[in-house]
Amino acid sequence: MAEFRWRSVDDFVEEALGQSWAGKTLHSFPVPRHFLNFFTTEKLWSGSVNVDLERVKGTLHPDYVGMSWGEFLQKGKRMGPNLSMLEANPGYYLSKGHKEPTMSYVVHDGDYWVYTDGNHRTCIGRFYLDLMGRETVLSGVETWEVKLDLEAYGKWCQAGGIHGLLGIESEIVARDDGPGWMKEKFGLKYFIHGKQVERREFLEFDETVKSSWWRFFRTLFRRANTV
């Protein structure tokens, strides 16, 4: 039977902060959430699976990136109400059914990040299960496993991101689904100065070479120095 064996949530937090991993940092995802779809080549959604909270590397929520797990437990914006929910219903973190409210994670290269829902509950659940001497496995959560074109993302950022000369678009080229899962594949389109190019040309882009404006002013400068 699920239990909350502390006299208060303050006692729970105090004991949790003594865990050896409480000082570990929540890391950012390789691609910001609002640009994620542009650089995703494949996506697999699973509606109700198990996640080992020890494998959660961080979050897509920018407010919490850089905090330690212990800091987040103390300073999370909605940590108070969620800690009260733990005290009232610790069984939530032990139940095998689908979590309501939903908890979701994005998965890349075997690591997990909190996606759209569940930042505070992930933090609390990891501490709670660990302190109870249980496996830190949470059941009934959803995952989005993605493959990314990180090379293209890096080049796009290097060229100035949304303010640069490179552009990228994504479209669904295949989809399959079944009970509790869905898989999509995406075709990425690459652009320089609004003109579609091959991925190789996109990755080889050098702004000082490709920019017509740069070439124009370079020619004027050379002419001025030969007069």
Image (cartoon, rainbow, N blue to C red):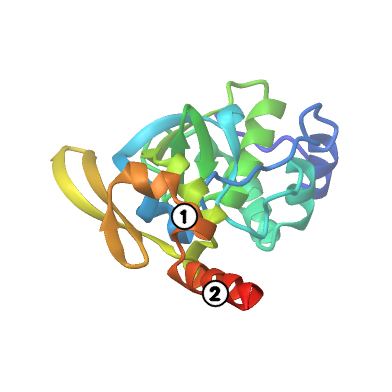
Label 2 residue SS: helix
Q: Seen in the image, is 176 located left or right of residue 108?
A: left
Residue 227 appears in which quarter of the rendering? bottom right
Residue occupying image coordinates x 59% and y 70%: 222
Q: Which of the labelled discs sits on residue 191, or is there none?
A: none
| Disc 1 target residue | 116
Residue occupying image coordinates x 49% and y 49%: 155
Decide if residue 18 is in sight here: yes
Residue 184, horizontal then vertical, whole percent? 22, 43
Judge depth for marks 2 and 1 and give the one in front. 2
| Disc 2 target residue | 217
Label 1 residue SS: loop
Front-lying residue, 142 or 10: 142
Earlier sequence position, callout 2 versus callout 1: 1
Residue 44, horizontal then vertical, whole percent? 29, 38
Q: CA distance from mark 2 to mark 1?
A: 47 Å
Q: Seen in the image, is 12 located left or right of residue 202?
A: right
Decide if residue 101 is in sight here: no
Front-lying residue, 224 or 45: 224
Please tell me how crowded label 2 is: few (under 14), some (14-19), or many (20+) other residues with Cα within 10 Å: few
Q: Answer whether labels 2 and 1 touch (C-beta < 8 Å).
A: no
Residue 149 appears in which quarter of the rendering? top left
Residue 172, horizontal then vertical, whole percent? 19, 51
Q: The N terminus lies in which quarter of the figure?
A: top right
Residue occupying image coordinates x 58% and y 21%: 135
Q: Seen in the image, is 208 located left or right of residue 145?
A: right
Under mark 1, the amino acid is Thr
Under mark 2, the amino acid is Phe
In the image, residue 181 sits, relative to residue 1, either above or below, namely below
Residue occupying image coordinates x 14% and y 39%: 176
